[in-house]
Image (cartoon, rainbow, N blue to C red):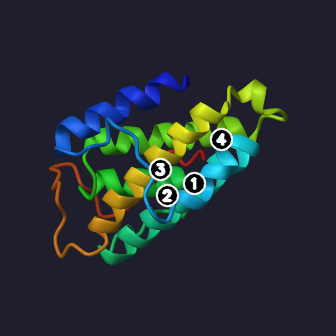
Amino acid sequence: MEWDSLDEARTEVAASQSAELDKPKIDRGFDDLLPLTESHPTAAVMLAAQRVEAALAKALKANDIAPLRFAFVDMIRAAGRHGLIDNPTERVLHNLRVLRNEVAHSHEAELAGVTPARATDYVATAASMVDVLTSLAVRPTLPFPRQDAVDTEKGADSTN
């Protein structure tokens, strides 16, 4: 997966939610990662991904949605299947997950294509997703009801 796909997915989410995700910004809660994007871009990506996963788990729990496992991929799929997130948000979360995996499994930042600028973009996108997910953790009803929502996640492909 290319880093450019993150830009495309973020733009789609911004259009669907009238959000400002198309202009990356880092807010409180993520500003501590900014110095890392320059000195240790891989670490910044990994820490930002952890925060997205935690926010997603909290949103799922608040909406009584239990994924098959609490792997990032399973949580994203459960949120999508149950209408907690819309399709563009689901794509951004999957892009963040795939890029996180590429970074985690590369022995050198250069092999994963991690530059300080890309790490900053990743952190900004992660911060935006945490904002979206945090707002979903306090909503009493699912914002994107789906016809194909299922009660169980059994049978879903569960690759991380």
Residue 36 versus residue 66: which sits nearer the camera? 36
Tell me the kind of residue under disc 1: Ala
3 vs 2, front mark: 3
Q: Splitting the image into 4 quarters, where does residue 10 fall?
A: top left
In contact (CB < 8 Å): disc 2 and disc 1:
yes
Q: Position of residue 5 (x, y in %)?
A: 45, 25
In contact (CB < 8 Å): disc 3 and disc 4:
no
Q: Secondary structure at mark 3?
A: helix
Residue under pointer 1? 48
Tell me the kind of residue under disc 3: Ala
Q: Position of residue 60 (x, y in %)?
A: 37, 68
3 vs 4, front mark: 3
Residue under pointer 4? 101
Q: Residue at x 39, y 75 (%)?
A: 61
Q: Residue at x 17, y 54 (%)?
A: 144
Res 126 label: 3
Residue under pointer 2? 52
Tell me the kind of residue under disc 4: Asn
